[in-house]
Amino acid sequence: MRTLRVRLPLGLAIAGALALAACGDRQADGAPAQTAPVEDTHTVPSEAAAAQLEDGSAPVEAPLTGDAATTMLTQLAGLGGAMHAAVELCDPSIPAEQLAQARARQQQEFVKMGGDAAMFDREFASAHDKVRAQYDTATPAQQQQMCAELESMASSAPAPATE
């Protein structure tokens, strides 16, 4: 499980990115999204985006707002809690301090994106408790499979960039 320990923060970041990607394709009614081939998709940038393209300036980092953003943020906090629980259960050799630091970084990023700390704590804890309950009621073979899937995700993640 040494690989899991080294790649924990990166794995959690990748999981967050996957959650972000998944949020964008959902429709409110639960129906599958209608998609067209990329070649058939024509978009026109907004006036603000066109102005940034013309002057080469980078977009301003602003907090997310609206119902879709709240849903996405809620899912991200939940994903963080679920991954936290899975790592605790599958690799108990990871120090609690390291997990607490990862959680604190996730919360910081969550707040930067427009969420509030109380919402993060609530969603994180809820998902964390659900994963622990699922693990506790699973058979040993199912527990082993859950941990193997987590290890597979961690080992397939790209190596962290060195600064």
Image (cartoon, rainbow, N blue to C red):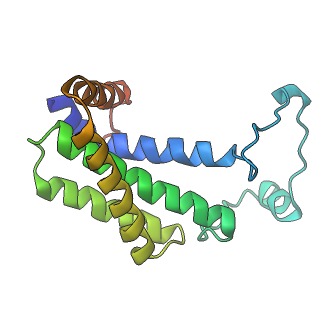
Residue appearing at x 14%, y 31% in the figure: 2
Q: How many marks?
A: 0
Can residue 52 be seen here? The reply is: yes
Residue appearing at x 60%, y 42% in the figure: 22
| 101 to 2, vertically: above or below | below
| 94 to 99, vertically: above or below | above
Can residue 163 be seen here? The reply is: no
Q: Position of residue 8 (x, y in %)?
A: 27, 42
Residue appearing at x 72%, y 45% in the figure: 30
Location of the N terminus (image quadrant): top left
Q: Position of residue 76 (x, y in %)?
A: 48, 55
- Residue 35 falls in which quadrant of the image? top right
Q: Position of residue 141 (x, y in %)?
A: 23, 22
Horizontal side of 100 relative to 22 (left or right) equals: left
- Residue 159 falls in which quadrant of the image? top left
> Which residue is more in the foreground, 82 or 12?
82
Q: Position of residue 150 (x, y in %)?
A: 31, 32
Residue appearing at x 28%, y 24% in the figure: 145
